[in-house]
């Protein structure tokens, strides 16, 4: 099947050709006709399945007819990186349409966003917190909205954005087409889908199934020996580009620093970085300036790099779904990839759930020549936070700080994993 079968507007079809697209992916084959037909869609699809083009192409096709300079399509995404990725896809596929797309998210100045909205745009790609700020300040007009896309809805829930989403929905026209995409379907997202979708077409592509091109391996190790083991593993492994996941942004930052000290071209991607530095880290990882990118799950949303040879879970994720989502960033585009996970005695439950999804036990490996018997230091010198500076007491007459006017909602902290004995790895 070729893209020509969709009978897209010539200017949209030209963007498909310019992007080098030839054969639609399974999600594109199923979703594009339904979206072109005006149906609401509930899509279950992992990262890397081509779902962005599955909704971008029909939206561009729809917007070729009708008024310009009004916001007619809104895409809501959980992170700035994913919002930029979607915006880039719109710009690339819509290169000959003359349709304008604007990104809206926190962490950057608001005035340039206001100016772009004032000049007119047909498509807005936004993160929930900053979008709600624009709505409250009346700097965006959504009264003529025709299409709403909620992308990676499960991660918007994970990050605590569901209350913001419900507030945003109250400001949108009731008569609209709504598309909801999610890698998983927890009950909260199922309830949201029931509330916002009307007689939807439900599509399920590769749900909870890893790519067959990925090889999996576990490296049992004590918590305090993770970094030495990782360094030796990197020295003994032929890698192209490596994506390493940690549980917290503090660990991502510190591990990135330690890898850089060891001589690796490394960047870390975590929530405390400015938008400019986040974009520089991503660009450097894509073009090969950085061989290693260390990231948290939330900060890594929107990473779309086809040449990742290895995904390493420095910290195992909390769920099997999160594991599948992480490793989906290697073994893409018919290339092989490797997924390594460092596991401790506390990770038994998650490992068993991952193995159930994979359909069998994961190979366990030991590194030759590595000393697994080094005792832990009395204090955590590796990831210990620097001492906090004392905060001066506020004078009784000092004014309280005002509430935020602009900025994204703060994500909820990740829940901690279980602490069971993992006898297999002793």
Image: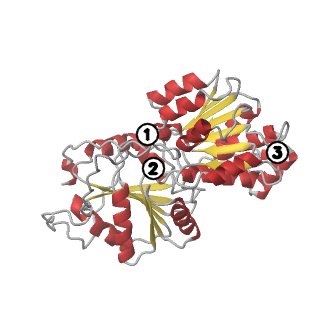
Q: Is residue 188 above or below residue 385?
A: above
Picture layout, residue 385 above or below residue 319: below
Tell which circle, 2 or 1, labels the residue nearer the N-terminal end. 1
Residue ID for mark 1: 158
Q: Earlier in the sequence, mark 3 or mark 2?
A: 3
Which residue is denoted by mark 2 in the rendering? 298
Q: Nearer the viewer, mark 3 or mark 1?
A: 1
- Does residue 403 appear in the picture of this structure? yes
Residue at figure coordinates x 24%, y 73% from the top left: 369
Question: Relative to 247, does residue 61 appear above or below in the rendering?
Answer: above
Q: Residue 261 in the image: x percent, y percent?
A: 36, 76
Near mark 1 (Cα within 10 A), the count class, few <14, some 14-19 or many ≥20, is some
Identify which residue is drawn at 25% across, 42% down.
418
- Image quarter where the N terminus lies is top right
Residue furthest out toward the front: 397
* CA distance separating discs 2 and 1: 9 Å
10 Å neighbourhood of mark 2: few (<14), some, or many (≥20)? many
Do the CB atoms of the residues marked 2 and 1 lie less than 8 Å apart?
Answer: yes
Q: Secondary structure at mark 1?
A: helix
The one nearer the camera, 292 or 258, is 258
Can you tell which mark lies on residue 341?
none
Mark 2: which secondary structure?
Answer: loop
Left or right, residue 87 beside residue 13: left
Q: Earlier in the sequence, mark 3 or mark 1?
A: 3
Number of numbered labels in the structure image: 3
SS state under label 3? helix
């Amino acid at each position: 099947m070729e893209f020509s079968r969709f009978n897209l507007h010539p200017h949209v079809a030209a963007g498909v050709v310019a992007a080098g697209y030839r054969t639609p992916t399974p999600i594109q084959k199923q979703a594009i006709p339904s979206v072109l037909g005006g149906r609401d869609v509930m899509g279950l699809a992992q990262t890397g399945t081509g779902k962005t083009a599955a909704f971008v192409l029909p939206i561009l096709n729809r917007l070729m007819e009708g008024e310009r300079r009004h916001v007619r399509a809104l895409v809501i995404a959980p992170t700035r990186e994913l919002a930029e990725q979607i915006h880039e896809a719109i710009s690339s596929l819509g290169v000959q349409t003359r349709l304008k797309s604007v990104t809206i998210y926190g962490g950057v100045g608001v005035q340039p966003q206001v100016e772009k909205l004032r000049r007119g745009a047909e498509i807005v790609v936004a993160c929930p917190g900053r979008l709600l700020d624009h709505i409250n300040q009346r700097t965006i007009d959504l009264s003529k909205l025709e299409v709403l896309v909620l992308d990676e809805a499960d991660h918007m829930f994970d990050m605590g954005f569901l209350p913001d989403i419900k507030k945003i929905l109250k400001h949108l026209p009731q008569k609209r087409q709504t598309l909801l995409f999610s890698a998983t379907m927890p009950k909260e997202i199922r309830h949201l889908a029931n509330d916002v979708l009307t007689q939807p077409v439900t599509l399920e592509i590769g749900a909870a199934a890893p790519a067959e091109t990925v090889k999996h391996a576990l490296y049992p190790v004590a918590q305090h020996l993770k970094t030495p083991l990782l360094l030796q593993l990197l020295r003994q492994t032929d890698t192209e580009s490596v994506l390493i996941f940690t549980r917290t942004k503090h660990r991502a930052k510190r591990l990135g620093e330690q890898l850089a000290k060891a001589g690796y071209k490394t960047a870390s991607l975590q929530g405390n970085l400015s938008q400019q530095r986040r974009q520089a880290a991503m660009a450097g990882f894509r073009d090969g300036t950085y061989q290693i990118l260390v990231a948290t799950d939330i900060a890594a949303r929107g990473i779309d790099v086809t040449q990742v040879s290895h995904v390493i879970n420095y910290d195992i994720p909390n769920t099997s779904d999160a594991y599948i989502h992480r490793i989906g960033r290697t073994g893409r585009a018919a290339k092989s990839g490797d997924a390594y996970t460092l596991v401790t005695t506390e990770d038994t439950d998650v490992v068993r759930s991952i193995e159930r999804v994979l359909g069998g036990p994961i190979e366990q490996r030991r590194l030759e020549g590595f000393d697994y018997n080094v005792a832990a230091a009395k204090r955590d010198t590796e990831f210990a936070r620097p001492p906090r500076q004392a905060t001066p007491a506020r004078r009784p007459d000092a004014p309280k700080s005002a509430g935020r006017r602009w900025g994204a909602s703060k994500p909820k902290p990740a829940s901690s994993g279980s602490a069971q004995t993992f006898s297999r790895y002793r």
